[in-house]
Amino acid sequence: MSAVVVARRLTVGYGEHRVLDGVDTFLASGGSIALVGSNGSGKSTLLKTFAGLLEPLGGVVEVLGGAPREASRSIAYVSQFHRNALALPLRAIDVVRMARFDHRGRFTRSSAEDEAAVAEAMDTMEIADLAAVALRDLSGGQQQRVYLAQALARRGDLLLLDEPTSGLDAAGRAAYLRAVESERGRGVAVISATHDIGEASTCDRVLLLAGRLIADGPPDVVLTPENLLATFGVGLTRVHDQLVVTEHQHDHGHDHGHSHDH
């Protein structure tokens, strides 16, 4: 299978500020990786570097055989924050149509292929009935579905998703997971940054991050209480199908308490 993402001794950050050191990873077409860690662990910074929005501070990163910026047309990226779009009087369908700008040019009439990609993406995320609604009038979860549909409509080779299930209800989450499975089936590689251990466990591989790489491997090998303690500073253990916070006596006097929702 062809390599979509390759990183060797990768260091990422902003300017002189190193956020994450020493990342080695490989992702083939149709594969999936979950980046798991708390806020500030380097997940978003690593995603932005893969997307070509940040230059690496050290090491090597390749996307589709070249620098990430060179592959931008083949990358679909969903960030955590979408401030600009909410300031504009855009309908849901307008936001999803933006995904096709790189394929045809901003002022060129959309093709039948463009419209088919948009319609299919909105159907997949179950928001076809919201097409004419202003984005600002949608709930947070509905807005997140719109942004995910936009990423799907791009029909890229690499999906980069920062907290993709944030704000989604159970139906939205199910639609998202089906969409990812379908995308992978057509050879799309997927990297998602998440706090959600359940979501991470659906991926082929998990990278646990805490300013450095804590562990890298299949979820059933990597997602151990010991590794999660090193990653989050709290212990997590499985009770039925849920991972719950456990108390640790050796917490060095810190209250890691109960505000974490992973």
Image (cartoon, helix red, strand yellow):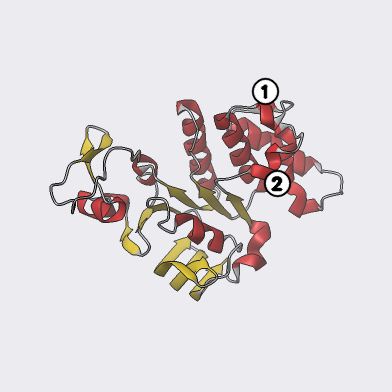
Tell me what residue is drawn at x 65 percent, y 33 percent: 122
Q: Helix or strand or loop: what does disc 2 sit on?
A: helix
- Provide residue 167's location: percent of width, then percent of height: 50, 33
Quadrant position of the C terminus in the picture: top left
**Which residue lies most toward the right here?**
108
Tell me what residue is drawn at x 58 percent, y 33 percent: 125
Of 158 and 139, nearer the camera is 139
Pointer 2 or 1: first along the chain? 2
- Provide residue 84's location: percent of width, then percent of height: 69, 44
Tell me what residue is drawn at x 68 percent, y 37 percent: 86
The correct choice, above or below, for 57 with respect to 245 in the image is below
Q: How many marks?
A: 2
Q: Helix or strand or loop: what does disc 1 sit on?
A: helix
Q: Tell me the number on the disc at residue 129.
A: 1
Q: Tell me the number on the disc at residue 44.
A: none
Q: Is residue 221 visible?
A: no
**Which residue lies most toward the left here?**
249
Of 240 and 136, nearer the camera is 136
Q: Is residue 11 visible?
A: yes
Residue 258 relative to residue 175: left or right: left
Amino acid type, mark 2? Ala
Amino acid type, mark 1? Asp
Residue 197 relative to residue 128: left or right: left
Quarter-wise, where is residue 71 in the image?
Answer: bottom right
The correct choice, above or below, for 53 with respect to 235 in the image is below
Quarter-wise, where is residue 244 in the image?
Answer: top left
Of 187 and 255, nearer the camera is 255
Which residue is label 2 attached to? Answer: 99
Tell me what residue is drawn at x 60 percent, y 71 percent: 67
Residue 105 relative to residue 92: left or right: right
**Which residue lies most toward the bottom here?**
59
- Provide residue 108's location: percent of width, then percent of height: 86, 49
